Image: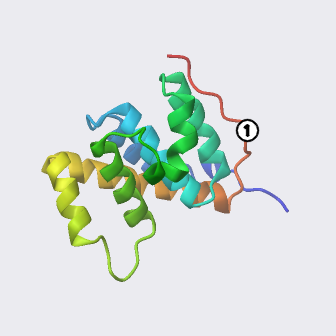
């Protein structure tokens, strides 16, 4: 099978998704929280490239191994704050969106922890990682090749 490097073939599409990514990074949301939601969505979507990327980026930013290992089973651990737990649950609901949408109780819980602007930015971040996951899985990005930028 011949791989398509979408970053080179469709530069306009890549720039558009990169623009979303830049918005998310500059949105004011906590960087650690962003890495957690990116990692959770990537696990759910089976995106090995993005799991590799976001574990490396989170480690480089000081995230603990214990919390990284616990992301797929976050409900069963005491390692996450109430705000992070709501964000992880919202990540799951938005990533696995179906005809029932996001449950009202979850939306209300998110409103308790995030301002309106933060909530919009959080959902934008979740949507953005889902786009990256779908591109990386479909076009079979080279797992393990990502290296974090030194901080």
Relative to residue 14, is residue 113 drawn left or right? left
The answer to which quarter of the image holds residue 126 is bottom left
Do we see residue 12 in this rendering? no
The picture places residue 98, in percent across and down from the top left corner, at: 40, 78
Residue placed furthest toward the top: 151
Query: Of 28 and 73, which appears nearest the observer?
Result: 73
**Which residue does the image show at 45% across and 69% down from the upper left?**
96
Label 1 packing within 10 angstroms: few (<14), some (14-19), many (20+): few
* Percent coordinates x, y for residue 107 in the rendering: 22, 63
Left or right: residue 17 versus residue 106 is right
* Closer to us: 10 or 95: 95
Q: Mark 1 — residue?
A: 144
Seen at 77% across and 56% down, the residue is 3
| Residue at 59 percent of width and 58 percent of height | 135
Q: Residue at x 23, y 53 (%)?
A: 120
Image location of residue 99, percent across then percent down: 36, 83
In the rendered image, which quarter is residue 143 located in? top right
């Amino acid at each position: 099978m011949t791989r398509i490097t979408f970053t080179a073939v469709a530069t306009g599409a890549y720039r558009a998704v990169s623009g979303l990514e830049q918005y998310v990074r500059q949105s004011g949301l906590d960087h650690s929280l962003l890495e957690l939601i990116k990692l959770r969505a990537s696990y759910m979507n089976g995106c090995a490239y993005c799991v590799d990327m976001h574990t490396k980026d989170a480690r480089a930013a000081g995230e603990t191994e214990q919390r990284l290992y616990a992301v797929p089973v976050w409900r069963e651990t005491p390692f996450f704050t109430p705000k992070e737990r709501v964000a992880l649950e919202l990540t799951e609901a938005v990533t696995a969106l179906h005809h029932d949408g996001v449950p009202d109780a979850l939306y209300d819980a998110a409103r308790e922890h995030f301002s309106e602007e933060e909530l919009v930015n959080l959902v934008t971040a979740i949507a953005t990682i889902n786009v990256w996951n779908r591109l990386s899985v479909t076009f079979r990005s080279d797992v393990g090749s990502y290296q974090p930028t030194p901080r």
